Structures are given as C-alpha cells and as structure tokens.
Amino acid sequence: MTAAPPTRTKTMTMVAAINDALALALETDPAVHIFGEDVGVMGGVFRATDGLQARFGTERVFDTPLAEAGIVGMGIGMGLAGLKPVAEIQFAGFLYPALDQILSHLGRYRHRTRSRYHLPMVVRAPYGGGVHTPEQHADSPEAILAHTPGVKVVIPSTPRDAKGLLLAAIEDPDPVFFFESIKLYRSVKEEVPEGHYTVPLGQARVVTQGDDVTVICYGGMVEVATRAAEAARAHGIGVEVIDLRTLVPLDTDTILESVAKTGRVVVVTEAPRTGGFHSEISAIIAEEAIEHLQAPIVRVTGFDAPYPPFTSIEDVYRPNPVRVAKAIRQVMAY
Amino acid sequence: MFQLVTPEGTVPQPDLLPDVPTRLRLYRLMRRARHFDERAWVLYRTGRMGVFPPYGGMEASQVGTAAALTHDDWLFPTYRDTGAALTYGLPIPQTIAYWRTSPHGWAMPQNLKVLPFYIPIATQYPQAVGAALAEKRQGTQNVAMAYIGDGGSSEGDFHEALNFAGALDAPCVFVLQNNGWAISVPTRTQTRATNLSRRAEGYGIPGVRVDGNDVLATYHVTREAVERARRGEGPTLIETVTYRIKPHTVADDPSRYRTEADTAGWDAKDPVLRLRTHLLAQGHLTEEDDAAITRDIEAEFEAALKEADAYPEPTPAEIVDHVFAEPTPQLRRQRAQLLAEEEA
C-alpha cells in the first residue's frame, strides 16, 4: 500500500493536512465512511471535513444525531459489518458519554470474539488547550484511552505527520483514537507531500538532537518543548526533544536510547498531573534505564483540577516554554 | 396486546397463523431451547458449567423473534438470550463452551453473524444500528436484530439507538423483552411507563406490543418487522410481554425480592405447553411425535456436550492474544513473560 513518499509538496496547516488525508481515504477505499456531529453540511466546527460531503455524498459523509455513545456505538456496528468508520467527536472532552462503548466494546471486540470480529475504526477528536475555548472544550483525556486495552492512541504535532499518521490510522485493522491539538490546527504550516503516504504507528520522532537533557512530549506540547529547547541551547544546554507521535503503540526504544545518552529527563503534557501518560513514561524509564539517570525525572503537566475556562489564567494551567525551561534547568542543576 | 393463541389454546384469528410446518418448527426450537436451559442448570450444579442466566419461560419471546432471521441477518443477544442465539444457529457445543468461559465458545462461527452475549446493558443497541446501516450502505437487504430487557430500556444507549435508527432509517428490529424484573427491581419501579412499546412513538418509529409467551404471535410480528426493514421502510420496536420465571442467574435467590405466588400465575402461561396444547388439539402433533422430539433433542445435546467436553483448556498466553492484529512491543514483552513463567 505504501509507495515511496510523493515528492511534490504543498504548504498546509494541520487542519488542511487532515482534510487532505480524509479525502484521500474516501477516494481510495469505498469502505471509509465519515460521520459525527456537524461533519456534513458544515464541514466540522474546525472545518476538518470541509467539502467532503459535497464531494463524496451524504452516504459517505453524514451528520448524526447529537449523542456520543450513539456515534461510537453505531461506528462499532458499522465496523463489524465491513465498513471503515471514521467518527468525529466534536471535542475530546465530549468523549465521556461514549466511554462505555469504548471501554466495554471498541477496545475488546477482537479479544472477546477471538479475532472473529475486529474493528477498523478511527475516532478523531480535537483536544487540548491554548486557544481560550469554553468549559470542557480543552480536556486531554489521552491517558484514559491509553489505559484501555485494545485501542491505539495517536497524537500528531505537525501537518506532515498528521496526514501520514491519519492515513496509517484509517488503514490500521484495529481501533485508533486520533487526537488533534486545537492549538496546532492553524498555527503551524509546513510542506506536506501531496498524494498518499503513511507515517507508521509506533515510531517516535526526534525533533531536536542534544546530549544533555531528553524532553519527552507529544501533540500540542511539542511546539512548547521545542521553544524551551531553543532557549536552553542559547545557554549551552543540548536538549533532545522527542515527539512520541503515538502513545499506543509506544516507541520505548527511542526513549531509552535518548535517556542512555543524556541521563536527564523532562516529560511534558497538558493533561492533569496524577495518573497521566507522563507518569507511565517516567515509570518505564525508572524500570529500564535508572542506571543512566543523573537526576530525578521531572514532569511538567497541568494540575489535578479541571482545565480552567478562565482566559487570563489558562496559560498557567497549560505548560508553557518558561515552565519547561525551568524544568530543564532543574534536572541540569541536580 | 397482539396474541394468536390464548393460554387455553383457542385461536381468535386463525387466518394469521403460520403454516403447519412452521408451527412444528417453532415448537421443536422451543423444546430445544428449553432443554438447553434445563441441562445448563444441572451442569452448573455439578460444576460443569459457569454462572448461567436462565431464560426458561421466555422461549416464545426468544425463539419466535430469532426464527424470523436468516444467517445473512445480524443477531445481537444479551446474556439472557441463549435461546435466541441457539434458534438463530449458534451451535450447541460452542454455546456450552461460551458459558463455560472457554475461548472455544467466544470465537463466534465464521458463517454466522451472531455476536457474543452482551453483558453491559443496552450497549448492543447502537451497534445493531451501525450493522444495519452498514448493510444498507452495501446494498443488501439484511437486517440487524438486537435484544434488550425492560431494565435495559432505561439506559441512554437504548434511547440513542432508537433515535439513530429512525433518523438514519436503519433496517433494525429492536426486541424489548419485558420480563418483569431487572434482577430484584420490578418493572413498576423501573419506570412509570406501562406500555414500553409506545416509547417508539417518541422516535418516530412503529412500536408493537405482543404476548411474549405466544410464539406464533412473536413470530408473526417479528416477520412483519423484518420484512418492513428489508423493504427499506425502517426500524421497528417490538415489546414482548413475558416473565422471568427463573432467577436472574443460577447464583441468584429471588425469594428475597418476590413471592412464589408472583411466579405461579406465569407457569400457567408456559409458552411451550401453550403451543403443544394447540398442536395436539389441531391434530398436528401426536404424543408419539412429541416423544420422538424429546429423544432427538436429548441425543443432540448429549453429543454436543461430549464435543464441548473435548475442548482443551486455554493456556495463560491466551490472556494477551487477540488484542490487536499485530501485538504491540509492550504486548509482545508481556507474552514472553507469560511463556517464561509457564516454563518455570
């Protein structure tokens, strides 16, 4: 399926790259169906599905009634019966009514039927803060999904990755949650290959190389960590930023290789602090690479409180380059 | 409430009866379902079956509905719908294995579109809508049938599914088995509604209320609902009014929440006896025929039990199998650990 990456490129935002991937998937595979709230006529609240219904028809791209459990549950049935459902949940913070469908069924259908049935379903959801959304619109629930057996979790941080990872997710035979940073939708642009290519699930990306500190992050935090790394470099500290890209499957090799080199680790997420995926990363490093550590691992995270809808203090909750830079200095000074 | 055969065996609308071979087929299927239920109970008591939710007394509700399907259609059964799954075609050895918690019972046969029994309440309803919609999108006339109980109809998923099916015109048949109890909670505590089929009206789809102990009636209304769905006329909700004579599961003690008198009235409405009385009275069945059916059913079950007994036990590594098509590095490592522990 995957040929050599196309050579022609086009400057795209992340949301445009996602739209491009969805159009390609609809074009190449008649089993692909896109549905959710407002994805049809309106093209999605962030316009990720813009123009797709007009191009592919109301059977392939359709609006559903407003009910998240219904959307995911119906998608499961569609997947069972031979389609490739690509559902959009309008905001990741609206996933919660569908958790019964996800935890009880989506993640365990293959297991509970010993592979008689499998669910090649993708659930896309915008996540995270940074753009002053109303209450409940900025949540980062990725750890809940990563803790759910049988589902994969993908969180791109660049337009190029977003397109390649989304195509890989749609082609994957198992359920994939695809979280898209609202902050990154339109704030970054880059050259994105035209046509079909995939970025394989389970391979982290080394964003910047460095010998002193490893900063591990994903999604909306990659930009924040990269800016902190640039500031540290000005002070002579070499920071290796690792973008995980996918939490499940997790590329532990890239993490452990980097830790062996640097011996110092900062993990960054915008999710609440306790029990987050950053804690899993910290535990893996503690179990498998503690002999390399020259300082305690530092986590830079949100707080154990709901994401604040208060514009003036939102940036205190969500990690920023200053907080990450402080953590880098902290592990260097130990 | 729609009825074709009264408990006394009289037939108010003889022109609506299915033909005699169909009536005999339904009788045999009910006898077969009841035999499984009775044998499962005994096997549990002797340690040869896991916890099992009995359905005895509800055969007309399950057999009459499931018998209206073909193997191109989908069946989404709850944990109490073993009778429906057997009727649809789930082989007895695998059904035994399922309730023995053996992986051999969890792998549903390739040639059937039946899902494993659903434990979470009502979650299968939206899934049936999706399967029905997928069939329609792929240009077939196949339908999806999903079961629920009166308790399950309180769940949000039930309401979302009826609404989705109506709004998206999915060829779905929703069976709501009103059997009076959600473990210890009677229907009157569950809801103020007294006619659950009328819930369909709220979603713009037809609702039918049928005597759930009259297999000819459940078969008749389900056939009509299936045909409507096949013709592209959309979903139907069927409320089968029946009674859970048996406990919630073989491990449940119903004397804590209901009296024997509550149940006794329903014994007289036994669906198997009702059809038997009718068939004997009409001369379509003799005592000798009936004895032959008994012998056949018993022999079939004993052979199936032998087959199920021969299934090997699972190995610990099966815990981490069948999670993804390709195991993640994490799962591969965990599998290696399990194998190493097995060898140690």
Image (cartoon, coloured by chain):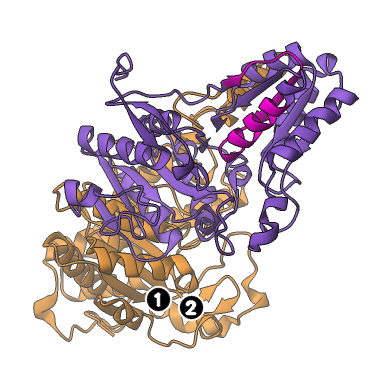
Which label was assigned to residue B180? 2
- Element at badge 2? loop
Place residue A119 in its image quadrant: top left
Q: Colour of chain B?
A: orange
What SS does tag 1 mark? loop
Q: Quadrant of residue B313?
A: top right
Q: Estimate the x, y position of residue A29 in percent, counting from the top left.
A: 23, 34
Q: Is residue B73 visible?
A: no
**Residue drawn at (47%, 54%), measured in percent from left and top?**
B118
Q: Which mark is residue B97?
A: none
Residue at figure coordinates x 53%, y 46% from the top left: A183
Chain that bears disc 1: B
Task: Indicate the chain on which mark 2 is placed.
Answer: B
| Label 2: how many Cα within 10 Å (few below 14, some 14–19, many 20+) | many
Q: Amino acid at mark 1?
A: Thr
Instruction: Quarter of the image for the C terminus of chain B: give it.
Output: top right
Marker count (numbered): 2
Q: Amino acid at mark 2?
A: Gly
State the extent of the magenta-drawn residues as a range: A206-231
The reply to whether callout 1 and callout 2 are in contact (CB within 8 Å) is yes
Residue drawn 36% across the image and 65% down it: B161
User: Which of the pair B64/A81 is nearer the observer?
Assistant: A81
Question: Residue extending furthest left?
Answer: B15
Visual hue assigned to chain A = purple
Q: Position of residue A14 (x, y in %)?
A: 42, 38
Residue A212 lies in the magenta stretch:
yes
Look at the image and tell me whether residue B149 can be seen: yes
Residue A167 percent across, percent down from the top left: 36, 31
